[in-house]
Amino acid sequence: MPEVPPPAPTGDELLKVLSALGNPHRMRIVAALMESRNYVSALAREIGMGRPLLHMHLQRLEAAGLVVGTLELAQDGKAMKYFEVAPFFYELTPHVIARAAATITETADRTDRTPKEEAK
Amino acid sequence: MPEVPPPAPTGDELLKVLSALGNPHRMRIVAALMESRNYVSALAREIGMGRPLLHMHLQRLEAAGLVVGTLELAQDGKAMKYFEVAPFFYELTPHVIARAAATITETADRTDRTPKEEAK
DNA sequence: GAGATGTGTCAGGAATCTTTGACAGGTACC
DNA sequence: GGTACCTGTCAAAGATTCCTGACACATCTC
């Protein structure tokens, strides 16, 4: 029988996904990677964007689990990091949002919080 | 026969929805309104948030079509704006994102752009 | 009129995100 | 050695978002 796990993402997870996808550039990046996987430098040229910037956006997408990057060594020995989209699937409905909202940890509020700070 | 229109949101629309939902407070607001519709001041007290701030968040959610607000006059003549969640439904998959990305207008990049500026 | 409750808006500062240029390290080729 | 690719990171500037404390207006009650 087909496995159809009910989509019930955690608040933090959904938050990362939505904020990652809610950006024009990152949407276009996903679209570009849909056509063909690519490595950072080439992708940067393709969509006309600085590499440091693309690198950051890719990191954000990867952290959300929307794309995956693998460091491969080409035949000439050069190390290239290829990215491709991950087969994600999320349903956005009031119920899903409400359920997710109930499991939001304070950690997700601020982007990054040094654990040291919390022990005030 | 049941109507099942294929979800193919435009880039700008999806962008507004995702950025609106990709925020802890706005998620909680939707969750709170799921239980019961409410008016601004009461909701502000319920979730412990300043009214001006709540007002802004509600505006953002309404602009994305996720909640609807109706100005009603109570029996005592007071005007109260009741908000309730709209029955939205979005599917998030690589394909949907790719398709939406193709229809992103420059207008969606910046939050608001005075039409006057565009005529450069 | 004074007080309580509703609505909405505005200016200003705090906190984040976005963007760029410069730097460091690696391998291959002329 | 010098050039051309690749990778990654950092600091500093720019642009948005988020948040708060006033302010103005309206209605009902005391």
Image (cartoon, coloured by chain):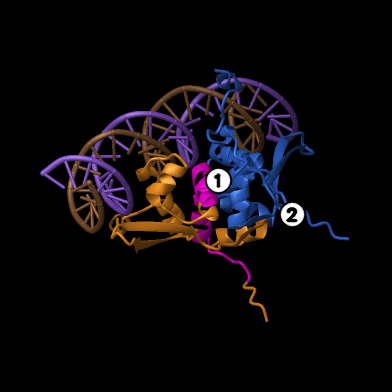
Chain colours: A orange, B blue, C brown, D purple
Judged by depth in the image, the label closer to the viewer, 1 or 2, is 2
The residue that label 2 is drawn on is B6
Task: Please identify the dominant SS of the magenta region.
Answer: helix
Which is more toward the observer, B115 or A69? A69
- Residue furthest bottom in the image: A1
Which is more toward the observer, A88 or B32? A88
**Chain containing mark 1:** B
The residue positioned 77% from the left and 33% from the top of the image is B77
Residue A104, percent across and down? 50, 59
The residue that label 1 is drawn on is B19
**Chain containing mark 2:** B
Tell me if B61 is positioned left or right of D7 in this view. right
Assess disc 1: are there few (<14), some (14-19) or many (≥20) residues with their C-alpha within 10 Å of its C-alpha.
Answer: many
The residue positioned 69% from the left and 54% from the top of the image is B89
Which is more toward the observer, B84 or A19? A19
In the rendered structure, find residue A89 and report the number of the disc placed on it: none
The residue positioned 56% from the left and 62% from the top of the image is A88
Check if residue B104 falls in the magenta segment.
Answer: no
Looking at the rendering, the stretch of residues picked out in magenta corresponds to A6-32
Please, is residue B51 above or below residue B48 in the view? above
Assess disc 2: are there few (<14), some (14-19) or many (≥20) residues with their C-alpha within 10 Å of its C-alpha.
Answer: few
The residue positioned 53% from the left and 64% from the top of the image is A10
Please, is residue A99 above or below residue B41 in the view? below
